[in-house]
Structures are given as structure tokens and as C-alpha cells.
Amino acid sequence: MLVTTSYDPASEDVDKAIAAARTLGGRFVPRKRLTLSGLRTRFGENEILLITKEGLKYDFGGPHALFFHPSMALVRYKRLRQGSSDPLLQLSGAVRGDAVVDCTAGLASDSILFSLAVGEEGSVTAWEHGRILAYLLEQGLTSYRTGEAEFDAAMRRVAIRQGDHLDGLRAMQDNSCDIVYFDPMFRAPIRESSGLSPLRSAADDRPLEAAAVEEARRVARRCVILKEGRQSGEFERLGFRETVPTGSKLAYGVIRC
């Protein structure tokens, strides 16, 4: 993987690019006047991590680059402030002081909502398998600014862990958190969700293991939740007897502990 900057970068962006290359095991190359396709041709690498004053972008040659943004989390937050309920928060019963483990962080949209619900007294740990995606999340959650102080503070409180969530769950003690959440890449993608296409290309697309659900049941005091397509057979395969539809495409499966 190449790590570079925008054209005419500030010195701090060069420093960030060098640090990112060192952390991720990539190769830092000065951008000069080369296009991204020019960099690929010259160095024979397809993956490029781009450091700009706006943030980080991971470009792997597809039609869209991947970058951190709060996505629907900010929309859902504003709805909450207007008095609406959020299906995930309502179903999980998340309250201030709870400990939540999000096993499939993605772009951390749900992790941020959980962080808003549990407040400073609680904790949200979000596992992400991919090194580059985990790095994008860490950098984005600590630096992205929306202008909403409460929302930005919630982003800062999300703790990203890079690695396999099954290993993370196995290392936890019995009944040591309140909620465990899974939102794996759907077995049957919802094609209308075009905004998730770059994420699908970069994220871990392995099916959720039954062993992970068993570990989640062991460590969760309140519930284990799985988000999937409404007609998915994953709920039955993984033992989620209670399913709650939300909209025409999605549903949550719940195991009460």
C-alpha cells in the first residue's frame, strides 16, 4: 500500500502520512504532481491511503474511495433530539452507564449512537477486523467535527479495537458487559445502500460465526443483537428466535440474557 498526500501538502500532513505508513506497514511516497493513477503505474501498487487537510481517504481503485464520516448516525442523533426514538437503542435498552461491545464497527455509526446513550459513565468498545479501516476509524473519531458538541464528544469516547471480535469476546469475563451487537456484512447485500459499497470492499465479509454468538451470550448481561436483512436466514442459523423488523428491508434479532 502507498501512503501519500494531496498536492502541495502542509508539513503536518506529510508528517501524518509518514506516521501512517509506519503504523500500517505501507510505503510513503511524495505526491509531487502525480495523479493517483500515475502513482499506481509508477510504483505498481493499487491501494493508496491519501492524507489531506480534510482527513484520510483509502482509495483501492474502485469508483469510490473510503473515508470516515458520521453517516446516518448524525441524522439519527438529530431525530433523537427532536423527540423521536431510535429502534436500536429502544430494542437494546441502552442507558447511561452501560457497557456495550460492538463486534463489527464498520464506520461506527451504531457505536456512536450507543456512546450517546451510555454517556460518559458508560463505555463502547468497537471491534474492526481490517487494519486500514480500524485506522480510518481511530483517526476519524478523534478528529472529525460536526459542530454538535454532544455528538462529537460521543465519537471521541468510542474505543476502537483492531482484530478479530471472537478473540476479543473470548478474552472477556462472564457477564462483563451489558450489550453485545453484531452488524456483519449482509449475506445478501441491499443494493439500494450504495453508500456502503466502498465499505463492503474494505470490510471483513466473513459470515458471523455461531461461536461468536455463544461467546456474546456468555459475556452479555442484558442482550445480544444482530442486524441483518429482514428475510435473512442468519437469524435462524445463529439462534435468534426474536426478530423485530424495522422498515421493509432490515430487522434486528435479539437474544435476551
Image (cartoon, helix red, strand yellow):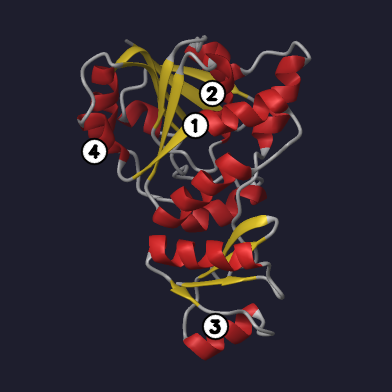
Mark 1 and mark 4 lie on one chain; the one further toward the N terminus is 1
**Residue found 67% across the figure and 81% down from its top:** 35
Kindly indicate whether the residue at mark 3 contacts the one at mark 4 (C-beta within 8 angstroms).
no
The local secondary structure at tag 3 comes to helix
Q: Nearer the viewer, mark 1 or mark 4?
A: 1
Provide the residue designation for mark 3: 40
Q: CA distance from mark 2 to mark 3?
A: 39 Å
Provide the residue designation for mark 2: 115
Q: CA distance from mark 4 to mark 2?
A: 23 Å
Kindly indicate whether the residue at mark 2 contacts the one at mark 4 (C-beta within 8 angstroms).
no
**Residue found 27% across the figure and 35% down from its top:** 168
Q: Amino acid at mark 3?
A: Arg
The local secondary structure at tag 4 comes to helix
Choose between 107 and 217: the one closer to the eye: 107
Q: CA distance from mark 1 to mark 2?
A: 7 Å
Provide the residue designation for mark 1: 158
Residue 108 at x, y percent in the picture: 53, 37
Kindly indicate whether the residue at mark 2 contacts the one at mark 1 (C-beta within 8 angstroms).
yes
Mark 4 and mark 2 lie on one chain; the one further toward the N terminus is 2
- Residue 240 drawn above or below residue 209: above
Q: Amino acid at mark 4?
A: Asp
Number of residue marks: 4
Q: Tell whether 170 sits left or right of 26.
A: left
Q: Residues within 10 Å of mark 3 (few under 14, many from 20)?
A: some
Residue 83 at x, y percent in the picture: 75, 10
Find residue 38 and report its image quarter.
Answer: bottom right
The local secondary structure at tag 1 comes to strand
Task: Examine the rendering and report whether any part of residue 249 can be seen.
Answer: yes
